[in-house]
Amino acid sequence: MKYAVKKFLMLLLTMVAVSFLAFAAFQVVAGDPATDLLGTEATPEKVAQLRHEMGLDRPFLVQYGSWLFGFVTGDLGESYSGGAVADLLAARVPVTLMLSLMSFALTVLFALPLGLRSVRYGGGVRSAVHTVVNQFLMALPPFFTGILLTWLFSIALQWFRHGDFPGFAVNVGGSLWYLLFPAAAIAIPRIAQTVRMLRSTLLAEMDKDYVRTAIARGNDRSGVLYRHVLKNSLVPVVTFLAQTMAEIVAGSIVVEQVFNLPGLGRLLLTSIGSRDYPTVQAIVVILAFWVVLANTIADLVNRCIDPRLGGARA
Amino acid sequence: MKKRILAGLLAALLCAALSGCGGGSGESGASGAQNSAGSASPESTADSITVGIAQDLDESLDPHLTVSAGTREVMFNVFEGLVKPTPDGDLIDAVADHHEVSADGTVYTFTLREGVKFHNGAAVTADDVIWSIERCADTSEGKAPLVEAFSNIQSVKATDDKTVVITLNAPDSEFLASLTTAILPAGYDQQATAPIGTGPFKFSGRVAGESITLERFDDYWGKKPAIKDVTFKIFESGDAMVLALQSGAIDLCAHLTTTQAAQLGDGFRILNGTMNLVQALYLNNAVKPLDDVRVRQALCYAVDKQQVIDLATDGTGVALGSSIYPTFTKYFDDSLTNYYTQDLEKAKSLLTEAGYPNGFDLTITVPSNYQPHVDTAQVLVEQLKAVGVNAQIELVDWNTWVSRVYTDRDYQSTVVGVDASSMTARAMLERFTSTYGKNFINYNNADYDALFEKTQLGAAADDDAAQVDLYKQMEKNLTENAANVYLEDLGDLVAIRSDLTGYQFYPIYVMDLSGVKAG
């Protein structure tokens, strides 16, 4: 219980700190919502007037405070480019959330079996081939995988039509099918990284004395691998997967651009461009929440896997 | 066993892939879900097309409040004024049937066209016209009028149901161009979200950040469009736009770069027009060393325009020499285009004369989201090296550019394109008068100011030829004083599905879809 409260407070603190930093960053860069709205119609007088109307001439801390107060009381504010921030988010969160979950599912689904298999190669040619392919896939940035997948599956094979995301409101099946390709684009490098991580952890564990003893006592290799080694290697792997959860969201911001998906990432980038503070703030807080949440879940799962951690950390 | 299953799966995948590849017609049916998206062969008939655009429209679609060129470009299909522009750069009557101008140039009498309806079905009356014009001329509460030229209006009156008389304080031969201002239903207050106009297409829906849809207006007074539905889809990433074109999700897309256009295959035709803007190395005339006319002229002599056009934009641009672009034929003065030809010796001696025998450091601030300007700046950097000017590119995002360069004028030089908000020379040239709020290059030349004043006064404003002559003198003034290093009007590449025809370029920044049809 105490643990949960502590975690929750940390979560709040992180979110406030991150939102403050994001707000502060905007004070440093040139341009603000007023210059964005006016564009080339801008004259110094017009900008000053609009700034005043929008309350942008107030001191920085006052602006941040009023945003924070609204946020805490459940009012995300109005986007400068129209509409309530809450409505903007409601339309986009499902896309990003589904994309992230699909990427994560793909990562786990492929990485665990592949990682386990790779350990059984031991050394030799297959291991070398495995390492080369793995290194190559690991180095692929998601936007590039995205373009490759589009060429292959959209332009050459015509399995899906790039840029034609139907939206969940219109067609759930079609939307999921479309999301499969960006999800794969994000997952492929993550799968490779997870496989490598799993393989090195497992191999290190396999060298331990208890494994040699178990094998010496007549247990077969794969039996030992699944029954003992895997269980003992899971803690770092789960922690790694939690990082993956966080990085998948980061990846989806880029991949949403490539696949023209109406998700949080696209909204974030346009909002930064137009200095739409309320929208950016809300998204930053959501992303921070996501990252902290993933780590908290990983902690909790690890405590279940290895009860010894509970005593050490609580 | 497992291996066999895997092999089977792979074989099945391969088969599906191959059949998907070969079967361009009919149902390829590799997956149920995929049919929702359709096969990638052009599914949209000429009945409906999808157009890719690079940014979302303004929050408000009210045409009187629109500031961004991208919004005006799209909504051109929805709204009309008393008059409207043609692809040739003329103005023809639209909501008006015909009009007369009094001999002294101050009284405009418009007779409204019979049978012009708003998209809500109501007929356009003189009241609507008066309401629309008065709304844009409103100066109550000390506001500037929405349409600057309307500050000259003395009165707008209806003499009968179909006749509107506009009286001006002083003659203004460019006044007609400002009457392209949209005519809207009187008192209608939902223009921002559910716009209603009289154009060939009517607004049918919008998803913020994603798309906007238009529908053919079947009661349009003029030639009705061949296309029934138009969807404008937003692709903020240029790569995503090209991929969507290749996969068939969009049928038409303007403002492509040459690299993007080159990636498209046989499915598309590339039409080559111009962007109707003046791209230049704009110089802050108020900062050292650019406040010296010899230095500015030296920069002009250092640059080879044609090489810029060839290298930065693959030869699609059209050279120019002052602040009027070539498609604006009435005012364009081609003799200024090659006023400065590359002459490194001359450039160096001018620099020496000005006290910079070893050149100087120059920062070129460029908005990073406009690739053609970035590419142009890169070529300029190399060319300027030859005369010892050590130029460096500073990339900034658009908002920073607007704030720092355009509004605060805190910069040395910048590469951008400047366009006209209306089809008048005034829109291009007034901006460099010394007291004008948008004079971002801080050009300060008494002769220039005097010339501009003359264009707006009595005799000249009344006499078209005299006014044109004055504007040309203003252009020459800019060139002679090397206000900026003028380069080109950028090429505008439009990709259009090869079975569609009828796309027309205009001398202003609009996208007219009313003529697009199959075959």
Image (cartoon, grey):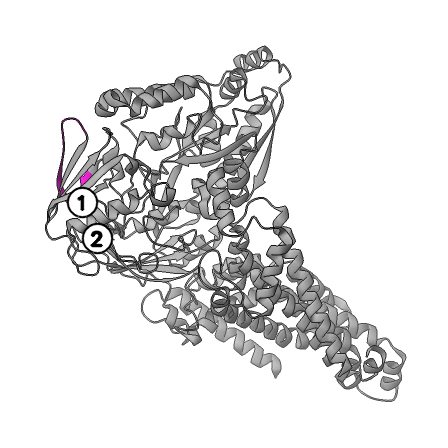
Which residue is identified by label 2?
Answer: B198
Which amino acid is tagged 1? Ala
Instruction: For mark 2, name the chain.
Output: B
Image point 48% across, 39% down: which residue? A45
Work out which quarter of the rendered image holds the N terminus of chain A and state it.
bottom right
Q: Secondary structure at mark 1?
A: loop
- Magenta stretch containing residue B96, yes or no? yes
Q: Is residue B12 visible?
A: yes
**Snapshot quadrant of residue B270:** top left
- Front in this rendered view, residue B390 or A42: A42
Residue on which the image places disc 1: B94
Q: Are marks 1 and 2 in contact (CB under 8 Å)?
A: yes
Q: Residue at x 30, y 36 (%)?
A: B151
Q: Position of residue A172 (x, y in %)?
A: 43, 75
Residue B11 position (above or below residue A133): below
B257 relative position to B102: left or right: right
Q: Residue at x 85, y 89 (%)?
A: A218
* Viewer can see residue A302: no
